[in-house]
Image (cartoon, helix red, strand yellow):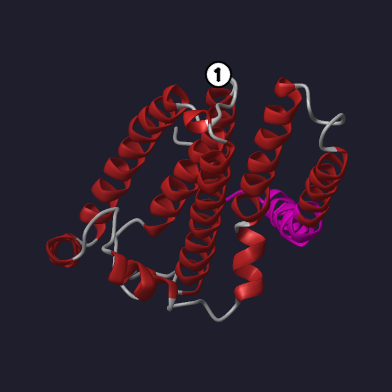
Amino acid sequence: MHLKRHHENGLFLLLIAVVMTAEEPQSSFGSANVDALLDGIGTIILLLGAVVRVCARGWKHEQRGRQLVTSGPYSWIRHPLYFGTLLAIVGLCMIHGSIFVFGLSMLAFAVWYVRLIWREETRLRGQWPKAHEAYCATVPWLVPSPLDLVALLSTWPKDIRGAICREADSLFLLPMAAVVIRVWELTESGTLWAAHPTQAIALFVVIGFLVGAWALVRQPHIKRRAVKRRNSSSQPSS
């Protein structure tokens, strides 16, 4: 029995959280300037990954039905949701700074998502054999070119609010993980409160904001799912 996709994504994020604790955050090349530069680039890549997931999830939800989704973000790569996850994990690893953690994270991504992609491709090929074959022949499976990435990000769903609600975990919890890594780095260096009290307060405020925003955005979605489960359980079995 397969887990639902949101459960599998949640378990993968939990796995990555465990992987991130395999080694303490590292200062890149022993240079504070290089470390700050990589942190900034990593943050941009992480947020880009979250935005890709929001765009792809919202588009797929609006196009759901009995046809193979090949438009919007899915016209540039076959698995934009997983590509967004890959970007976010790469960004987190850049902020963490450990080559060892980066290697473990890429291994975890490969093992976890290659399995999911193979399973989904098999299911889609069984449902729409000719359409899926033509789709695979023209559209790459995971990584777009830079120009295709720009085009992918230009195809937003109509219901952006709903897309953000469905991807609240990626949009808020992944950036929160990046902030936690920064707090951990300062704590390990012994300079969190002594040398950077203002930064420490700001980091904890950001964590609180992200947690609160995540809970606020997720609340309507959680309520809808609870009502749906309640309604389905109250229906008489045939």
Figure check: 143 above or below 119 = below
Q: Position of residue 57 (x, y in %)?
A: 50, 63
Residue 31 visible in the displayed image: yes
- Camera-nearest residue between 209 and 112: 209
The residue that appears at 86% across and 31% down in the rendered structure is 193
Magenta region, main secondary structure:
helix
Q: Residue furthest top?
A: 22
Could you tell me the amino acid type at mark 1? Glu
Determine the image quadrant of residue 33: top right
Q: Secondary structure at mark 1?
A: loop
Q: Position of residue 4 (x, y in %)?
A: 51, 43
The residue that appears at 79% across and 52% down in the rendered structure is 215
- Camera-nearest residue between 223 and 162: 162
Q: Position of residue 2 (x, y in %)?
A: 45, 36
Q: Position of residue 147 (x, y in %)?
A: 29, 71
The residue that appears at 28% across and 61% down in the rendered structure is 144
Instruction: Verify whether residue 139 appears in magenta.
Output: no
Q: Is residue 2 left or right of residue 184?
A: left
Q: Quadrant of the N terminus?
A: top left
Q: Is residue 8 left or right of residue 72?
A: right
Q: Which residue does the numbered mark 1 point to in the structure image? A: 23
Q: Residue furthest bottom?
A: 158
Determine the image quadrant of residue 149: bottom left
Residue 4 visible in the displayed image: no
Instruction: Verify whether residue 231 appears in magenta.
Output: yes
The residue that appears at 69% across and 51% down in the rendered structure is 229
Q: Which residues are magenta?
A: 214-238
Badge 1: few (under 14), some or many (20 or more) residues near its Cα, within 10 Å?
Answer: few
Figure check: 5 above or below 30 = below
